[in-house]
Image (spheres, rainbow, N blue to C red):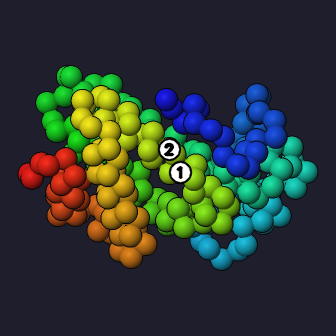
């Protein structure tokens, strides 16, 4: 199952699908503006502010997104899809890899949050306010199931490992995101990830 197979987020993310290159660029500009507003945390997350920053009319915005909630949902769906794509690439080459697959998955997960720490932190922090936390939890649990199946490990143990890793990463993201890029942090996080599996590196 991929992000496309998951239940849609509560908000309708796209009123109509952009088909032409011009409309796709318009939607990209709207989402990029929305992401910048979240990162800067200075302007309210409203359709008017997003449209202004994107350089598009409010009417053009409403052609594709019915509300700010829908834009937030689209950003979160994009975040989930990026995480799942990175994990899927690793799992697809499990047999050929000479490295530790669990560690590779962990590093990919950390990078997905560390590459845009302020945006990612805001997405996770605001998800409950937009009724999107259950969608994110479902995506996490589905990813855990895929990992368990690919590695032949108990699904419950992998789910506990994934939840533990996510908790530490999100807490670090909020308190000291610079730590996410340190090898010492990765080593300690790896030990946490292995613990529910009865493995002690």
Q: Judge by depth and name the residue closer to the eye, 186 or 144.
A: 144
- Which residue lies under the disc numbered 2? 139
121 vs 190, left or right, is right
Question: Which residue is outermost to the left?
Answer: 201
**Where 81 falls versus 29 (above or below)?**
above
Question: Who's the residue at 12% across and 48% down the image?
Answer: 199
Give x and y (percent) for residue 111: 36, 52
Question: Who's the residue at 76% across and 33% down the image?
Answer: 18
Give x and y (percent) for residue 178: 33, 69
Question: Which residue is outermost to the right?
Answer: 59
Pointers 2 and 1 in contact (C-beta within 8 Å):
yes
Q: CA distance from mark 2 to mark 1?
A: 5 Å
- Which residue lies under the disc numbered 1? 136
**Where 1 falls versus 110 (above or below)?**
above
**Where 48 falls versus 147 (above or below)?**
below
113 vs 155, left or right, is right
């Amino acid at each position: 199952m991929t992000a496309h197979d998951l239940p849609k987020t509560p908000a309708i993310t796209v009123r109509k699908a952009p088909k032409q290159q011009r409309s796709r660029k318009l939607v990209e500009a709207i989402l990029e503006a929305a992401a910048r507003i979240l990162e800067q945390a200075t302007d309210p997350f409203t359709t008017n502010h997003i449209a202004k920053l994107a350089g598009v009319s409010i009417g053009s915005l409403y052609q594709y997104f019915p509300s700010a909630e829908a834009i937030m949902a689209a950003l979160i769906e994009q975040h989930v899809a990026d995480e799942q794509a990175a994990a899927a690439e690793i799992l697809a080459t499990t047999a050929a890899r000479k490295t530790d697959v669990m560690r590779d998955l962990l590093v990919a997960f950390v990078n997905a949050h560390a590459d845009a720490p302020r945006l990612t932190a805001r997405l996770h922090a605001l998800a409950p306010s937009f009724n999107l936390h259950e969608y994110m939890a479902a995506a996490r649990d589905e990813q855990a199931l895929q990992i368990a199946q690919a590695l032949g490990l108990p699904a419950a143990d992998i789910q506990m490992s994934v939840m533990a890793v996510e908790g530490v990463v999100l807490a670090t993201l909020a308190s000291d995101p610079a730590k996410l890029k340190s090898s010492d942090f990765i080593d300690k996080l790896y030990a946490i990830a292995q613990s529910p599996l009865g493995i002690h590196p």
